[in-house]
Every structure is written in structure tokens, then in C-alpha cells.
Image (tube, rainbow, N blue to C red):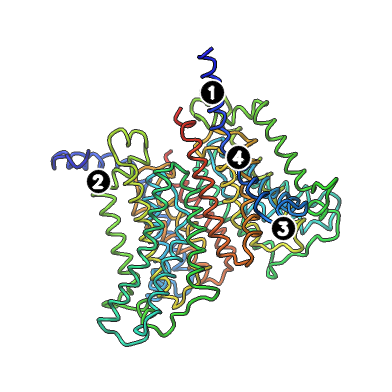
Amino acid sequence: MKADATSIKSHAASWIRSQGPLITLVVLLIFAVMRVPGFRSAVNITNIGKQVSMTGVLAIGMAFVILSGGIDLSVGSIAALAALLAARCSGEFFLAPILIPLAAGVTAGAMNGVLITRVKIPPFTATLAMMLGVRGLVFILAGKTAVVSGVSGQWFSKIAWGKWMGVPYAAMIFAGILGVAIVISRYTGFGRSVYAVGGNEEAANMMGLRVTRCKMKVYMISGACAAIGGMMLASRVTSVRPDIAVGWELTAIAAVVISGISLVGGIGKIGHVLYGVLILGVIPNIINRLTERQTTYANHLITGMLLLAVVLIQSRIAKKHNTH
Amino acid sequence: MPDSDTPAKLLASANMQHATGGMSFVKAHSMPFFFLALIVLNSIFTPSFLSIDTLDNTLRQAFPMMLVALGMTMVISSGGIDISVGAIMAVSAAVTARIFALSVLATTPVSVLLILWMACAICCGLLAAGVCGLLNGMLISKFKIQPIIVTLIVMFVARSVAQMILGELPLSLMGTRFEDLGRLRILGAPIQVLIMIGAVAAMLFIAKKTVFARRVEAIGENRRAARLVGINIFRVTVGVYVLCAVLCAIAGVMEAARGGRVDAGRLGMFIELDAIAAVAIGGTAFSGGRARILGTVFGAVLVQLVTVIVNMNDISYHYSLILKAVVLVTAVWAQKDK
């Protein structure tokens, strides 16, 4: 009996330690609901949903990459490329603004994969090169004027602005992709091989897993997710500038790491990305509502501090969990 | 531990390094060839490429990125990454410029008092950078947070602090003695070039001759093993990030002096990308390990050459991004272990 009680206790403790991101998010939400004026309003919640779903989709792709032991710095540039192509194609035939950017994203992801698996360049360097290269391509495609006609008023803009029963389409897309990603990571051979490759690449290779193919798929998924994020952005704004989505890769990486997925690879759960994404989305919202003056400097400072607090709390919660 | 080594042992280990280094000589030197090819091609195609002015300009423009890349090499050698470098440049430049501009001395002719005041201002800038580096190193080693997240947070905080120090508008240093510092020449050589040579020499000394660099490498190669042999991971990690931050601060202050103004929102923006590219081209492994200082120097000059060539041939900036990507991939591919 006594042994049972302690084992239940230790189970509960280890469960709590593995739920650091969720606990942090709940604490943050409780604080926001109690203390932040206007946070609870439906408009605000919808806004947060719209904002986080773009970088959220990127973070899902990034989670696969990081779980496989890699990193993808090119997602911001790929999102910009997709946004540009979506805006350009919005007047063309039906589905063109979806299919063409998606194809571009998958191609860019495949190029990442080829550089990493065939040319054998480390992921950090390869995707850094792609980040620079694709951004250059975006600038060139945008041309001299650097602004491309927008997509407002067409069906395409409904992706960002439309809603069904109060839930924005963008949030539904994010939730849907997250659901698919969870299923893939848990119940498919590919999902398990991502964990195996991230955990120990050599062992995975010796077990007969197709490491190269797995990595190719992972980077193509990341490229596709970046493209979807870019499309959502294109449908949200009225004009696409070539310096759009700069720094999104850092937001995505931060969301993934905050959700408890280790950059070493093979450790973490895709579903937890939701918490990381929401934490990163709620913090600036809280700050914007609390500070009267809209000076971005102070906001950045407070965002940094809050983020630091979140990460510190999590490292405390997870400390014993990791050493086990 | 290397510090208990006898001279004979050290000599033996140095010889061994040479022996194993010989194998990788050709591979390691594919980059200088690449570099030479770039120079030869451009001396043919780019007008007035081979002039003293071009060299002078290239070196002066390469200066901030070179210093940042040197610091980044050590950070990457320890298995970390520092994306706060640009923000640290901005905060140190902001602190230095703000303090320097406080005094009426700023526009007076050169005097001992002025030099002292300038040194005092620069020291404050270095101190601010040191605090950022300390924060980076402490959070990474004590609280075990991933370097990319820690330095991302510090990037946010440092840049917003820099902007809060300077306010909305860029601070102009036009007409102050500070601007002269950026134009200073000693025996005909720009001060930037002299500092650069000094920094490269110092970093080469640190990387080749000191126990510190070995400890950094040990942490980068195998953190657990490093801890087990008694290396103080906290102290070494903090040391690495402070060293990197101080180099960034020198770069930031000199960049402010060269431009004659400090724009806290733009100074050092995206320099981390160029610096990381330079380190990657230089052959230091991102998983941690030996710091290749000379490789980084080549990498930094190469990345800067791309920018200069693009500027001189009147090609638009966008193509320079693609060219950089190609150079990065080719250089890393050329020297990878086959």
C-alpha cells in the first residue's frame, strides 16, 4: 500500500515535471484573465488566435525538424516567398494561390534536404544559406517597386479574415495541421523514425531505417508548413513587401524550445508546440494591453523579461525530470 | 590537465597535431584557393578592384563583422551560439556615445582630459557588453537553457535598452572628437585595421596557446566528460560569452565612430548572420569542437568581399544574398570530411 502511494506520488510528480509548458501557460492565462483589462473579450481572443496561427504552423514544421536533430533557419524566407507568390497568383485560376506557393515551399524544403543529406552540409549552415538565398529570390521577384498588389476582397482573403461560429479559419487551419502532425508523430512509422533519427542517427541507420529519406521528408514538411504560414500572412495583409516575415524562424524555434522539445533531437512532444505558440502569442498581447504607451522599445524589453521568466520557471520544473 | 604538462609533453602533442594536421592540409586549404580565385576573377572583371582604396575600404568595412566572427568562433567552439551579438554592439555603442556626448569636452581639441573621458566612455560601453555576456553565460550554464533561446532573449532586451538610452532619433556624433577616432590613422594604417590585426593575433594566441581554449573545446566536444575531468563549466562558459560580448562592444563602438552616428535600431542588425556564415566557412563545427580562428578570418574576408564585389559592380543587394548563399554552401562543401 505504502509503495503504491509513493509510486503514484512520483508518477504525479514526473507528470507535472513533463507538463512545464502547460503549467506556465495556465499561470499566464490566469494572470491575464484576472489582471489584464480586455483580455477576456471575444475580439481579443480571436485576434490572438489569428496571430499565433501563422507562426504556429511554422512551429509545427520546425518541431519535426528539431525532433529529427536538425534545425531550419530558412522558414522565414520560405514564408515570405510563399506570401509573395500567393499575392501574385491571387488573380489566377482557382487554387493557384494555394498550390503554387505550396509547391515552392516543398521545393525549397527539398533543397534543404538535399543540401543536408546528399551534399552533407550541417543543417545550421545549409538552412542559413537557404535563408539568405531564398530571401534574395524574394527581393528579386518583388522587383523594383518592392510592393506587390494585395489580395483584399477576394476569396483568398477569407482565410485570414473569415470565421465560422466565431472561430477564425486561420485558427482552424492551425488546429487541423496540429492534429494531423500529432497523429503522424504518434501513430505512423515515419513519426517514430523521426524520433529514432533525432535520438541516435547511427543507431537508426543500423536498425535499417531510411535516415536520408526521413530527413528529406522532415525538411519538406517544414517547407510546406512555412509556405502555409506565408499564405495565411498573404491573405491577411493588403500588400506583400519582400522584407515580410523576417525573424519568423526565431519565433518558431523559440516556440518549439519553450514547448519542451530539446534541440538535441528526439525528445519532446509535437502536441506541446501548442503551449509554446500560445505562450509566445499571449505575452505580447498582455504587454500591449497593460502599457498605455505603444512604445515598442519598452514592450520588447518586457517581452524579453517575461520570456526569460517563463524559460526559467520551466527549467526549474523540468530540472529533475531531465536528470532522471 | 594541460597546465600540468611538461614542456616535452607539450612539444610532443604539438608535433602530433602537426602530423594529423598534415592530412587535412589540402582540405583545410581549399578555402584560400577559393578566396584567391575570387580575387583573381575580380581583378579582371571588377574595375579598380586592385587598388589601395579598395583594400582600405574592404578592411574597414570588414572590421565589425571580423571582430564579431572571432568572438562567435569561440562561442561555437563551446557548442553554443550567440545571436545577441548585433544587439550587444548597439547597446555598447549607445552607452559609449551617450556618456561621451554628456561632456562639453566632446568637441574640444585633443587633450589628456578628452582622451581620459573617451576612455571612460568606452569602458562603460565595454562594461555594458560585459553584463550582457555575463547574462548569456550565466543563464546557459547555471540554468541550463538552450543558448539560442538565451541569446534571443538577450537580443530583445539589449536592443530595447539601447533604444531606450538613445530615444527615438539616432544620436549624431558629427563634429565631436569621437568621429575623429573612427578616422584615426597610425603610420598610415586605419585604426580599424590595427585593432583587427591585434584582435586576430590575440584570438590566435588564446586559441592555440591557452588552457582556456582547450577547456572551451572540451565543453564543446563533450560537456559531460569536461565536467567529469573537473572543468568549471560555469566559469568557462561565462568567459566565452563575455569574451564574445567584449569583441562585439569594440566593434560597436568603432562602428559608431566610423559612421559618426548611433542608430540603436539599426546598428549591428543581422550581423549575426554574416558572422555565423563566416565561422561556418572557416570550418568550426556547429556541434562544438576546435576553434579555427584563421578559418574564421578567411571566412569573414570572403563574406565581406562578396558584399564589396556586389557593390562595386553595381549589382543590386538582393543578388548579394544569393551569392553569399552560394559561397557559403560551396566553401563548406569544399572542405567537408570526405
**Residue marked by disc 4:** A63
Residue indicated by mark 2: B211
Q: Disc 3 or 4, which lies upstream in sequence?
A: 4
Give the Cα distance between marks 3 and 4: 25 Å
> Which label sits in the foreground, 1 or 3?
1
Q: What's the residue at 52%, 70% (across, down)?
A: B311
Residue B295 vs residue A173, the one in the foreground: A173
Among the two numbered marks 4 and 1 on one chain, the one whose residue lies closer to the N terminus: 1
Q: Chain of mark 4?
A: A
Q: Secondary structure at mark 3?
A: helix
Type of amino acid at the residue the image marks with label 2: Val
Q: Which residue occupies 50% across, 53% down? A: B153
Quadrant placement of the C terminus of chain B = top left
| Pointer 2 local density, CA inside 10 Å: few below 14, some 14–19, many at least 20 | some
Quadrant of the rendered image containing residue A284? bottom right
Q: Earlier in the sequence, mark 1 or mark 3?
A: 1
The amino acid pointed to by label 4 is Ala
Residue receiving disc 1: A9
Q: Which residue is mark 3?
A: A84
Q: How many marks?
A: 4
Name the residue rendered at 70%, 53% in the picture: A39
Q: How far, Cα to Cα, is label 2 from label 4?
A: 38 Å
- Give how far apart the Cα atoms at labels 3 and 2 are: 51 Å
Disc 2 secondary structure class: helix
C-alpha distance separating marks 4 and 1 = 31 Å
**Residue B317 visible, this orientation:** yes
